Image (cartoon, rainbow, N blue to C red):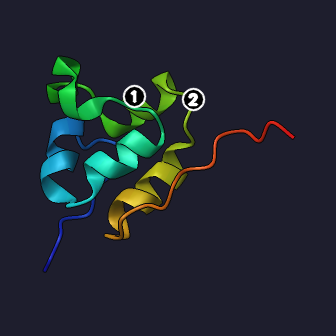
Amino acid sequence: MDMKKITKETNLHQALKESPNAALVFASYHMGCASCSGGQQETVEWGATMHGVAVDELLSRLNDGEAPSKKKKASKD
């Protein structure tokens, strides 16, 4: 399957359409982009910034096409 590359400028809902695992990737960062009405206008970069996520890491995960494993949040140890 040929996916379009998701960039910083891609809006969040378009990323959800382009990447089969985007909803899981966003959820692994606690980003509710799949249900957010702002996702129609806001970019991946904006969403990452608002959620304190490194945009390059997020883009890498969105574009790799693999389902994410459980995202590790900051360790409590």
**Residue at image location 31% in from the left, 70% down from the top:** 65
Q: In the rendered view, would you say 5 is above or below 58?
A: below
In the image, 51: left or right of 18? right
The spot of residue 76 in percent (x, y) is 80, 36
Question: Answer yes or no: do the residues labelled 1 and 2 have beta carbons within 8 Å?
Answer: no
Q: Amino acid at mark 2?
A: Gly
In the image, 20: left or right of 26? left
Q: On the image, which quarter does residue 9 sit in?
A: top left
Q: In the rendered view, would you say 3 is above or below 52?
A: below
In the image, 12: left or right of 53? left
Residue closest to the eye, 57 or 34: 34
In the image, 52: left or right of 2? right
Q: Mark 1 Cα within 10 Å, few/some/many (few <14, many 20+)?
A: some
Quarter the N terminus occupies: bottom left
Query: Could you tell which of marks 1 and 2 lies nearer the N-terminus?
Result: 1
**Residue at image location 14% in from the left, 28% down from the top:** 40
Mark 1 vs mark 2, CA separation in Å: 10 Å
Q: In the rendered view, would you say 42 is above or below 19?
A: above
The spot of residue 37 in percent (x, y) is 16, 19
The spot of residue 68 in percent (x, y) is 43, 61
Query: Residue reaching furthest right?
Result: 77
Q: In the rendered view, would you say 72 is above or below 68?
A: above
Q: Which mark is residue 52?
A: 2
The spot of residue 25 in percent (x, y) is 38, 50
Q: Amino acid at mark 1?
A: Trp
Instruction: Please name the residue that numbered disc 1 is placed on.
Output: 46
Quarter the C terminus occupies: top right
Residue closest to the eye, 2 or 65: 65
**What SS does tag 1 mark?**
helix
Q: Which mark is residue 66?
A: none
